[in-house]
């Protein structure tokens, strides 16, 4: 019976036509062109490089964070003011030894040390009298001189500012700056 109907159907008739089978739609962005793979690779490399730089910078500044934390812990201790002054001076020296070459910092004392702190900190805080005052207090005999709360606060503030803001310098430039700033009698 089927053969009879096939003969009766007109070949020009639309009855025998079927719908066109369309494949499933593909994503317009896949597969990626080679340029996109290159861009993705460059972005990964850039991301890894930025992470490395951030980690390196954090590691380089860790000594500052630790020194500020120690200074604040010392402030909360409320120990003998003369003892606190001595501990602040020790903390400043330890921080400087962590930031600068030992050969430039270890032997500095007195006026040369205070000039170093001022030059590396960018502001004259210590050489104008605060440093000498702190030194007198730290090494004075009991009862010779008393530390006022205001002076101690000034010293804490100056020490914290120096720890946070001192500029790291290379060996040659710091040695040259110290040599140029030393008075004729000290050099």
Image (tube, grey):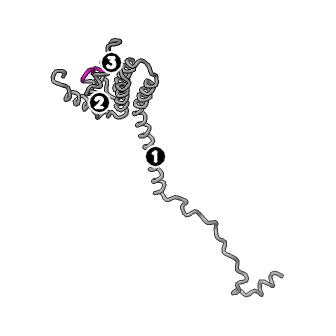
As helix, strand or loop, the secondary structure at mark 3 comes to helix
Residue carrying label 1: 47
User: Residues under labels 2 and 3: Cα distance?
Assistant: 17 Å
Measured from the top left, where is residue 99 in percent x and y?
A: 35, 29
Mark 2, Cα crowd under 10 Å, few <14 / some 14-19 / many 20+, is many
Q: Is residue 76 magenta?
A: no
Per the image, the residue denoted by label 3 is 137
Please tell me which of labels 1 and 3 falls first in the chain.
1
Q: Residue 125 has which mark?
A: 2
Tell me what residue is drawn at x 32 percent, y 13 percent. Answer: 144
- Kindly identify the residue that appears in the image at 27 percent across and 24 percent down: 113
State left or right for residue 88 relative to residue 118. right
Give the quarter of the figure containing the N terminus.
Answer: bottom right
Determine the secondary structure under disc 1: helix
Indicate whether 52 appears above or below 183.
below
With respect to residue 54, does 84 lie above or below?
A: above
Residue located at (70% from left, 77% from top): 18
- Residue 15 in picture, x, y percent from top left: 73, 83
Residue at left offset 34%, top offset 23%: 93
Q: Give the side of residue 8 with respect to residue 23, left or right.
A: right
User: Which region is colored magenta?
Assistant: 106-111
Q: Nearer the viewer, mark 2 or mark 3?
A: 3
Between the residue at mark 2 and the residue at mark 1, the CA separation in whole angstroms equals: 41 Å
Give how far apart the Cα atoms at labels 1 and 3 are.
Answer: 51 Å
Residue 183: quadrant of the picture: top left
Q: Toward which corner of the image does residue 138 lie, by quadrant? A: top left
Could you say where residue 49 lies in the image, as x and y percent from the top left?
43, 43
């Amino acid at each position: 019976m089927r053969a009879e109907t096939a003969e009766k159907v007109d070949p020009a008739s639309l009855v025998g036509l079927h719908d066109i089978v369309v494949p499933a739609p593909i994503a317009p962005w896949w597969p990626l062109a080679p340029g996109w793979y290159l861009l993705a690779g460059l972005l990964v490399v850039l991301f890894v490089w930025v992470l490395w730089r951030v980690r390196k910078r954090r590691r380089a500044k860790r000594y500052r964070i630790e020194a500020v934390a120690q200074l604040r812990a010392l402030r909360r201790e409320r120990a003998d003011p003369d003892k606190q002054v001595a501990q602040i001076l020790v903390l400043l020296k330890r921080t400087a030894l962590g930031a600068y070459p030992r050969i430039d910092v270890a032997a500095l004392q007195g006026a040369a040390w205070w000039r170093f702190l001022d030059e590396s900190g960018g502001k004259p805080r210590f050489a104008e009298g605060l440093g000498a005052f702190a030194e007198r207090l730290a090494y004075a005999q009991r009862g010779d001189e008393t530390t006022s709360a205001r002076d101690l606060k000034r010293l804490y503030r100056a020490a914290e500012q120096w720890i946070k803001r001192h500029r790291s310098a290379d060996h040659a430039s710091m040695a040259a700056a110290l040599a140029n700033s030393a008075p004729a009698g000290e050099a």
